[in-house]
Image: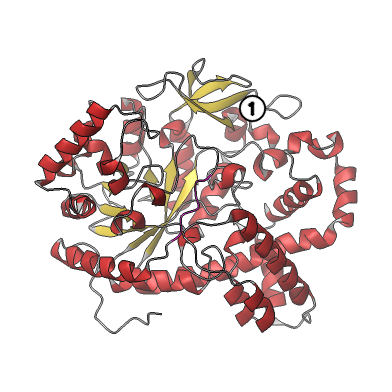
Amino acid sequence: MSTRLFKQDCGLLMHPSSLPNQFGIGDFGPSALRWVEQLAAHGQTLWQILPLNPAGYGDSPYQGLSAFAANPVFLSPEDLHARALLDDQELLALRMPLQSRVDFAQVYANKAELSERAARKFFALPATHPLQSEYAAFLASEDDWLQDFALFSTLKAHFNRVAWTDWPAEFRDRNPEALQEIAIKLDSELQRVCFEQFILRLQWSRVQQRAQDLGVRLVGDLPIFVAHDSADVWCQPELFRLQADGSPSVVAGVPPDYFSATGQLWGNPLYDWEAHRREDYGWWRQRLSRILSWVDVVRIDHFRGFDACWEVPGGAETAAAGQWIPAPGREVFDAFVTDHGLPLPVIAEDLGVITPEVEKLRDDYNLPGLRIEQFAFGTDPMSSTFLPENYVPNCVAYTGTHDNDTVLGWFSSQAGEGSTRTAKEIEAERAMALAYFASDGSEIHWDFIRSLYRSRAGASIVPVQDLLGLGSDARMNTPGKASGSWAWRLTMTKRLDEALQHLETLTRETARGRTVPRGTLPLG
C-alpha cells in the first residue's frame, strides 16, 4: 500500500454555488466549464467542492435530503437553452444581477419554475429524440435509488415540507398500497424529479469530461452521516437505529472538549452496523461508487466515525451524556478496496478527537489525512503538527476549510465576535504567525499560501476566499450557526485573474501542479 494518491498536486476549494453567473447561484453550466479551464490554465490540478446533494436544513450540503441525488439548484439555464428546453424569453426572465450572496428563497423559486418549463418541453419530445433514449438509459441505470428519491421528494413537497416522521402514518411507514395510489396521483411531479436528476447528470458529465481532458481532478465530499429527514432513512430505516415512530433512538455528536463544555449535538441518526454487515455493506459500497462516478477523489468527513462514533441518546439536549461506540471501519474499507482497488481515491478528514486506533485505520489503507494551517498557531498540544514544516507527503494541506474563518478573518478577529478564543490568545496566535512567516501581516493570506505550496504535502488546497484575501464576510460556514451560511459567491473576477497569475508563478516556483503552454486553453 505504498502508492500515494497525490504528488505535488495543488488546487482551489470552491463550491459550484459560488461560481459567478447571472442566475443567482453557480451551476453545472458554462461557469463551471470556465472555472475548470481557469484552474488548468494556471497550473492547478485539483478542484475541491462540497457535497452536491440536495441541501436540507439551513441550506447545508451536509444535511442532504439524499446521499445519492444531486441538488436541482445546480441546473444550468444556459445548458437547457442550448438543448432547446428553454426559449430565449424564458432564459432572459431567469437572469439576476450578480450579487455576493445567494438568495436561496429566490433561487429555489426560480429553479422550480425552470424545471417545470424544461420538463414540459422534454416530455413533449418525440420518442425518437436522442434525449429520450438517453433518459430511458438513465432511468434503468439509476433505478436502485432514483424512484425512491423521487417519491420522497414529491411527498415532502406534497406535505408542505414537514419531516417524514410527521407525515400520515401510512406514508411515514411506507404502506405499499398507499404509496402506489399516491404515486399515480402525483405521477407528473415524480417524472419531473427524475428529469431534473437526468439533466444534472448530463450537465455535470460535461464538466467532468472537460476536467479530465485538462488534467484537473475533481475532489468531492462525503459526509459520514446522513440527515434524519432524508430519503435514505425513510427508504431504508432498517439500516439506522430508530424507534418505532421513525425518530432516532441515538444520534451523532462529538464529546465535550476545550472549545465546548457540552460537546456538539449533530442529531444525525447512527447506523445499525449489524444490519449493514448482514448485507455486506451494500449501501455504503453503493454510496461510495455513486460519488466516485461524479468525482475523482472524495474526502470523507468525520473519518474517525469509522473507528468509533460518539453516541448520544435521542432527545438529549446536549452531547455531554454520550459514549464512544465502536464501528466496523476495517470491514467497510476492505469492501471499498474490493470495489475500487488501491490506492483508494479517498481523503480521510482526521480532525478532532483522533486516537492511535483512528490513525492506524487511516494509515493501514494509506489514506492521506488533513493539515489545517490556521491550527498551527494555537495553544493546543497538537498545534505543531499543523506547521507547514512538519507536513508529511501523504497529506492534504489547507490554509483553512469551509468550516474555518478566512485567513484574513482569522488574523483580524477580535474576542467576543463568536470566537472561542480570548483576546490574549488571539494576540498570541497573531504574534506567532507573524514571527513564523517573518512578516508584517500586510499580505497574511499570501504568507499562508506560500508556505503551504512550499511544504512537503502531497496536495495543497486553498479556499478561493483566501486566494483573494477576503475577510470574515466571505466565510462559507460558521459551525453552529442556524442560518446565513453557504451563501458566499465570487463576484470580483478581475481580482481573481490577478490572484491566479500570482498563484501560477508560485506553482511553478514550488514545482507543483502542471505546466500548460500558453494559448492552448480557450477561456471565457
The residue where tag 1 is placed is 241
Q: Amino acid at mark 1?
A: Arg
Q: Secondary structure at mark 1?
A: loop
* The magenta segment: 484-489
Residue 371 on the magenta segment: no
User: In the depicted view, which residue is nearer to us: 302 or 256?
Assistant: 256
User: In the depicted view, which residue is nearer to us: 493 or 118?
Assistant: 493
Residue located at (48% from left, 50% from top): 339
Picture coordinates of residue 424, whole percent (x, y)? 23, 27
Residue extending farthest top: 321
Magenta-colored segment: predominant secondary structure = loop
User: In the depicted view, which residue is nearer to us: 369 or 483?
Assistant: 483
Among the 4 quarters of the image, the one containing residue 240: top right
Q: Count neighbours of disc 1 (C-alpha within 10 A) and say few if under 14, some if 14 to 19, many if 20 or more.
A: many
Residue located at (88% from left, 56% from top): 184
**In this view of the protein, can residue 379 be seen by the observer?**
no
In-image side of 2 versus 493 (left or right): left
